[in-house]
Amino acid sequence: MLNAILRTTLLAIVGAFFIIATPVASMAKDEIYTNWRGLAIRGYDPVAYFTNNSPIKGSDEYELKWKKATWRFVSADNRKLFEENPERYAPQYGGYCAWAVAQGYTASVDPVNAWKIVDGKLYLNYDVEVQMKWVKDIPGFIAKGDANWPGVLD
């Protein structure tokens, strides 16, 4: 009798562990990729990629909330430009890796070393190695990414 109780208890504990430990496939990802602090592009100014042709870390003095993410800027002017037209400056695919989205999933990005502006739009990649794959067929990967977006968030 004691063995049956122990076995039942053990099965219940193991079952509960698997329920808790198993990720829920239906959990959607946020529309904008953010770091653990809620910062889009890890705190880099999205406007600076266009105006300075380089990533520049934004300041908490010039923050803006957009699509549940905190965006940082180097100046009030850059914040105003973004606020007036966020779709113009925000990275494509919510700031997730463009190559990953083309492959049908999402991944984080390296906003300092793996970025590119194509046809007036900012694309980010996981790292330089992944970006080297992406640049081999940018139009093809953009077409695939556009077809997969935003479905990869589900």
Image (cartoon, grey):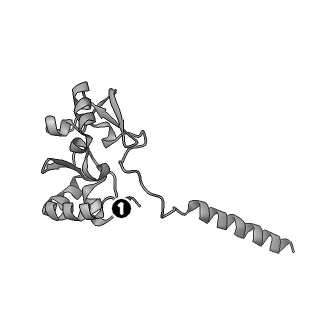
Q: Quadrant of the C terminus?
A: bottom left
Residue 64 pos. (x, y %): 34, 33
Residue 110 sits above or below residue 59 on the image: below
Q: Which amino acid does the dot numbered 1 rest on?
A: Val
Instruction: Name the residue carrying label 1.
Output: 152
Q: Is residue 109 left or right of residue 142?
A: right
Residue 144 sits above or below residue 34 on the image: below
- Residue extending furthest right? 1
The number of numbered badges drawn on the structure is 1
> Residue 23 or 94: which is nearer the viewer?
94
Mark yes or no: residue 52 visible: no
Residue 117 pos. (x, y %): 15, 48
> Residue 15 or 39: which is nearer the viewer?
39
**Image quadrant of residue 69?**
top left
Q: Quadrant of the N terminus?
A: bottom right
Q: Assess disc 1: are there few (<14), some (14-19) or many (≥20) residues with their C-alpha within 10 Å of its C-alpha.
A: some
- Residue extending furthest front? 84
**Image quadrant of residue 37?**
top left
Q: Residue at x 79, y 69 (%)?
A: 6
Mark yes or no: residue 11 visible: yes
Residue 135 pos. (x, y %): 15, 58
Residue 24 sits above or below residue 35 on the image: below
**Image quadrant of residue 38?**
top left
Q: Residue at x 23, y 58 (%)?
A: 130
What is the secondary structure assignment of the residue under circle 1? Answer: helix
Residue 90 sits above or below residue 9 on the image: above
Residue 74 pos. (x, y %): 25, 29
Q: Residue at x 40, y 42 (%)?
A: 68
